[in-house]
Amino acid sequence: MQRARSVQSKPEEDASAQQDSVSSAAPSDDTDTDEEASSGSETTDTGVVREEMSEGDAYMRAGKYDIALRKFRIALALDPDNEDLPDRIERAEKIQAAEDNAVR
């Protein structure tokens, strides 16, 4: 009797496994630009730039402005056309300079 139950449940398991494989093969909803999609290295650079910016923001919140500046400058070297980075660098430099003057 247990064999009959296990045989009956197998088609359901197989059907759910097929659904899982179909759903994992479905295209993602990412909205990459044509440039990013055309070259894998550009997509990787974009990911690295985002990561560096995110880490830089986290260091800014933590008060580690020298590390944040390093992160922002790395991101700027990878993506010189990024419009947000010059503002972030300028803000980090001003805050770091103000703190350096306050300590002295």
Image (spheres, grey):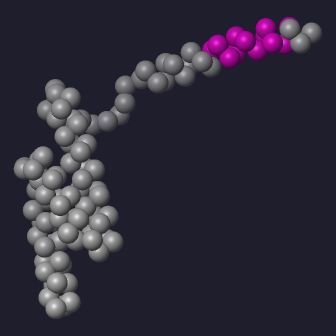
Magenta stretch: includes residue 11: yes
Tell me where residue 67 appears, x and y as whole percent. 23, 65
As drawn, the residue found furthest toward the left would be 80
Magenta portion: prevailing SS class: helix
Looking at the rendered image, the quarter that the N terminus falls into is top right
As drawn, the residue found furthest toward the front would be 104
Magenta stretch: includes residue 75: no
Nearer to me, 65 or 33: 65
- In this rendering, the answer to whether 18 lies above or below 52 is above
Looking at the rendered image, the quarter that the C terminus falls into is bottom left
Residue at left offset 20%, top offset 42%: 46
Q: Residue 93 falls in which quadrant of the image?
A: bottom left
Residue 95 seen anywhere in this rendered image of the structure: yes
The part of the chain drawn in magenta is: 4-15
Tell me where residue 96 appears, x and y as whole percent. 17, 77
- In this rendering, the answer to whether 39 lies above or below 101 is above
Residue 99 shown left or right of residue 21 in the figure:
left
Residue at left offset 28%, top offset 50%: 51
- In this rendering, the answer to whether 29 lies above or below 9 is below
Q: Residue 57 falls in which quadrant of the image?
A: bottom left
Residue at left offset 20%, top offset 84%: 99
Nearer to me, 88 or 19: 88
Residue at left offset 32%, top offset 64%: 58
Tell me where residue 6 appears, x and y as whole percent. 81, 12
Q: Residue 48 falls in which quadrant of the image?
A: top left
Residue 84 seen anywhere in this rendered image of the structure: no
